[in-house]
Image (cartoon, grey):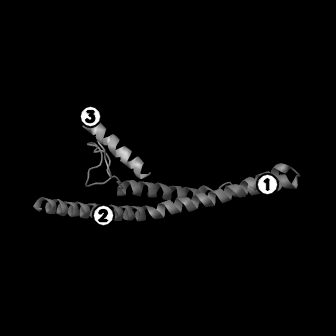
Amino acid sequence: MTWDEWEQLKTSAAEQSDRGTTQMRLNQVPVDRDGPTATSGDLAVDQQDLAAVGDSAFKLFEGLGNHGRDAWSSSQTAAKDLTTQEFELGSALHVVQDRWEKSLKTLLDACAHISNHMDFTKKAHAGDEHYIAGTVSSIATLDKGFDEGAHRS
């Protein structure tokens, strides 16, 4: 955005404000009475939500680990028998089984990753929220000090 564009936006917002329509807002979102409060922030991470996601990922990991290869033995036997009988379907079934195994490993890795990182995510967001709240409150304190100094002049 160029300086001229910025000046045009400010002028337009000021004109709308003079007409009683929309006001210009900088560095904030509109206040939503039903939404998050200033103290809770926009980012809400609930430990129960994270635990539920992590638990679901773990259950999927266990289920796939226990049953994801149930058809492996019979599929390999069928692929071998079909190939021995010179059916092209035998090699195709072997390819499908190989792709299933690769996909299963990828999905198991993803489930493990999700499950293992839910606690980390909660801690990281809590730290971010604490940092942001501290920074914003520091700015508010600084602004208040400047305002008080301006009134003394």
- Amino acid type of the residue tagged 1 in the rendering: Ala
User: Quadrant of the image for the C terminus?
Assistant: bottom left
How far is disc 3 from disc 2 in space, using C-alphas?
40 Å
Relative image position of residue 38 (x, y in whole percent): 26, 52
Residue at position x 46%, y 63% in the image: 117
Residue 83 in the figure: left or right of residue 40? right
Residue 30 in the figure: left or right of residue 106? left
Q: Which SS class for mark 3?
A: loop
Relative image position of residue 44 (x, y in whole percent): 34, 54
Residue 64 makes an appearance in the image:
yes
Residue at position x 25%, y 55% in the image: 39
Residue 17 position (above or below residue 26): above
Q: Nearer the viewer, residue 39 or 137?
A: 137
Residue identifier under label 3: 19
Q: Nearer the viewer, mark 3 or mark 2?
A: 3
Q: Residues within 10 Å of mark 3 (few under 14, many from 20)?
A: few
How far is disc 1 from disc 3 in space, using C-alphas?
78 Å
The outermost residue toward the right is 86
Residue identifier under label 2: 130
- Amino acid type of the residue tagged 2 in the rendering: His
The outermost residue toward the front is 4
Q: Which SS class for mark 1?
A: helix
Q: Which SS class for mark 2?
A: helix
